[in-house]
Amino acid sequence: MKNIYLDNAATTPLHPEAFEAMKPFLLEKFGNPSSIHSFGRETRAALDESRDVIAKLLGAHPSEIYLTSSGTEATNFGLKGVSSKLKREGRNHVITSKAEHHATLETCEFLKELGFHVTHLDVDSYGMINPEDVQIAITPETGLISLMLVNNEVGTINPISEIAAIAKENHIIFHTDAVQAFGKIPVNVVELGVDLLSLSAHKIYGPKGIGVLYVRQGIEIEKLMHGGGQERGRRAGTENVAYAVGFAKAAELIVNSRENEMKRLSNLKSSLKIMLEDKFDFLLFNGHPTECLPNILSFSFDSRKFVIDGESLLINLDLAGIAVSSGSACTSGSVKPSHVLLAMGRDEETAKATIRFSFGRTTTFNDIEYVLEVLEGIVKRIGKTIS
Ligand SMILES: Cc1ncc(COP(=O)(O)O)c(C=O)c1O
């Protein structure tokens, strides 16, 4: 049986070159980077170099890069880290959107417990945030805006530099979740004009369990972890040198091959879209037609025309060796449609009947042809046209 992985937006396999770079730091180069002897100096140098590489790729200064355990931690660190000062200043209003990742949404829920008011902006039918809506939502109390650069479920790219400029004019701290964007589109903190930015290594063929928070110089951020002086005293705990090295290597590789690779994936995406449209006339494509990542293709079966259970579709694809994501999540035993698709205006049944293909560096045209053939068989078997 074939094994085709089309869930690269969920996670990616470690790049062999990243693994090779990490290996010495998992085995022989084990010193604590805080130690002053040669063992420590060796890992300190590797850690510093990794930070430098990541900073350079982002257009940031190394002192603006904080290593974390994940993209989720980076977002928690960023949003919570600036909250106390904002609270003290009476700027207790936060703006985010209905289509954010749970890392942002749940952190904003926590900020509510601290006394913040949170506005969740609507997105349009493509999942895009309108900068005018941001402008309208701003009040004299607004201290923080957090909006994602690329949506993980549908791939839509938001006009972040435009929104960051609005935030700046109003002296509001601006955070963006660039976890899905990095390595796929240019991500430069100066060009984007952001104050805080989150990244995660496992979406770019780096190891799981490491992320980055960029904090612009001049932004006051509170400690996330109390303890030693690591990460300039903001996130104590002995650093994960091997993972930092793997992250830096993976980041370098993906950014350097980005243009060619994204062209290749864009061709795959358009071919698959055409083939899908050809085979099925009851599909609704999710995400912006042009302002969208080339490696994410999300589509729903229109519940007014066709009935199919998204979870069964996913399971049947899995039985055929094809890994994809659906438009729902299993929470406490019940299947809930995706909050992103609902925010885009899809009805519950259509949202549940959604499949997200996310391509990666090993995806080929043959994979796409095979997936289409298998999909057609499953859809015929378990779906039903509404007459
Ligand atoms: C847009 C977005 N933000 C944040 C995260 C969380 O990253 P991590 O898995 O490193 O916590 C993800 C991962 O699914 C994501 O897609």
Image (spheres, grey):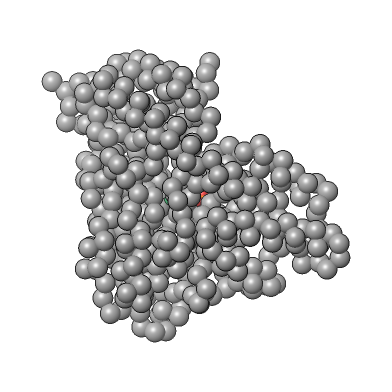
**Which residue does the image show at 53% across and 51% down from the upper left?**
200
Q: Considering only vertical position in the picture, is 311 above or below 346?
A: above
Residues 302 and 266: in front is 266
Q: Is residue 186 left or right of residue 42?
A: left
Residue 361, horizontal then vertical, whole percent: 52, 33
Residue 12, horizontal then vertical, whole percent: 54, 39
Residue 91, horizontal then vertical, whole percent: 35, 79
Residues 37 and 282: in front is 37
Q: Is residue 379 left or right of residue 265?
A: left
- Residue 306 falls in image quadrant: top left
**Which residue does the image show at 38% across and 56% down from the upper left?**
148
Single out the residue that lies furthest toward the right: 37
Residue 323 shows in the view: yes
Residue 341 shows in the view: no
Q: Is residue 4 left or right of residue 47?
A: left
Single out the residue that lies furthest toward the left: 387
Q: Considering only vertical position in the picture, is 361 above or below 170?
A: above
Residue 110, horizontal then vertical, whole percent: 42, 66
Give the quarter of the figure containing the C terminus. Answer: top left
